[in-house]
Image (spheres, rainbow, N blue to C red):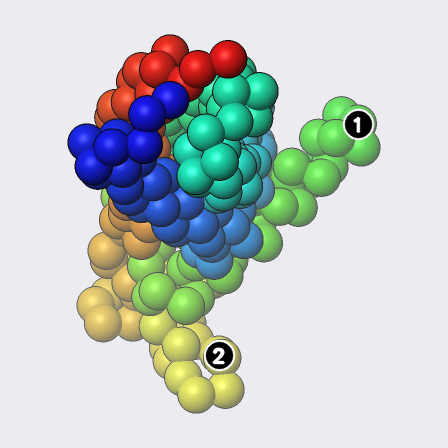
């Protein structure tokens, strides 16, 4: 291949494209690691619905992000050395990783609209403080949902998905196990003092504000998950768009390398 200024300029452009791709891969990996670390503690609620695909998409994103970083280095070396064999390996592996990232981005994008109020409402009504688990898997889900809801309601000063009325409006395992006079809603719905005890338990049971938290927990639950799903999906799509042009340029360069 003739080493003229045009070729060197073309090499520089493709190398720059791979540098950006490698940095994007690192960023994607970091973003997905943060996501799967489940900072919001929402995973038990999704596991109870038997649909945690958004976490699967994030794990794929960790893999593809790391691969983009490694393969971008391989591509840069192959371009600098004008090595056809190395570039061929780079292109083949990059297409495989590209396909995985397409799957990850599509999965995350479709799951973004999955986090609706009824999703959290159903598993709350079915699993919260359920005293009759059918098997060990069911017991695991019950404990996960109960502990997650208790933590959310205490830390965020909220109650139910839409508010305390959820426990009165809908049939739930909790309502079947507790009378209206004793516990119209979980004690975690009550306003707490510094010792973690209800400020006024009787007023809380009567639904008197501010002794009962009237706002629901939906925004605190779905908000972080929706934002992370959006990030995994659309950052992934943007990387795919950039990668497409990098691969196209690399393929064109490969065809111009002399045997």
Q: Which residue is at the front of the view, 86 or 95?
A: 86
Q: Quadrant of residue 194?
A: bottom left
Image: 110 above or below 79:
above
Q: Residue at x 57, y 48 (%)?
A: 146
Q: Position of residue 153 (x, y in %)?
A: 41, 59
Q: Position of residue 125 (x, y in %)?
A: 47, 34
Asked whether the viewer can see residue 223, the reply is: yes
Pointer 2 local density, CA inside 10 Å: few below 14, some 14–19, many at least 20: few
Q: Position of residue 179 (x, y in %)?
A: 50, 46
Q: Secondary structure at mark 2?
A: loop
Q: Which residue is at the front of the view, 62 or 207?
A: 62
Asked whether the viewer can see residue 61, the reply is: no
Q: Quadrant of residue 50?
A: top right
Q: Which residue is mark 1?
A: 135
Quadrant assignment for the N terminus: top left
- Left or right of residue 194: residue 66: right
The tag on residue 197 is: 2
Q: Which residue is at the front of the view, 157 or 45?
A: 45
């Amino acid at each position: 291949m003739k080493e003229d200024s045009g070729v060197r300029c073309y090499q520089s452009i493709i190398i720059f494209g791979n540098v950006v791709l490698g940095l994007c891969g690192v960023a994607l990996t970091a973003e997905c690691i943060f996501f799967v670390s489940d900072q919001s503690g929402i995973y038990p609620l999704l596991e109870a619905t038997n649909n945690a695909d958004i976490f699967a998409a994030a794990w794929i994103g960790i893999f593809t992000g790391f691969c983009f970083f490694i393969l971008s280095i391989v591509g840069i070396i192959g371009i600098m050395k004008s090595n056809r064999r190395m570039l061929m390996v780079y292109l083949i592996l990059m297409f495989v990783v590209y396909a995985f990232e397409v799957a990850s981005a599509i999965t995350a994008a479709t799951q973004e609209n999955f986090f609706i109020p009824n999703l959290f409402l159903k598993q709350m009504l079915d699993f919260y403080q359920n005293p009759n688990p059918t098997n060990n898997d069911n017991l695991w889900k019950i404990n996960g949902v109960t502990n997650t809801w208790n933590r959310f309601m205490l830390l965020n000063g909220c109650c139910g998905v839409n508010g305390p009325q959820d426990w009165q409006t809908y049939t739930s395992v909790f309502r079947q196990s507790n009378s209206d006079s004793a516990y119209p809603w979980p004690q975690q719905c009550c306003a707490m003092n510094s010792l973690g005890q209800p400020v006024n338990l009787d007023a809380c049971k009567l639904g008197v504000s501010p002794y009962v938290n009237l706002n629901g927990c939906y925004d605190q639950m779905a908000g972080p998950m929706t934002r992370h799903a959006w990030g995994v999906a659309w950052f992934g799509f943007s990387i795919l768009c950039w990668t497409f042009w990098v691969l196209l340029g690399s393929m064109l360069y490969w065809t111009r390398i002399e045997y």
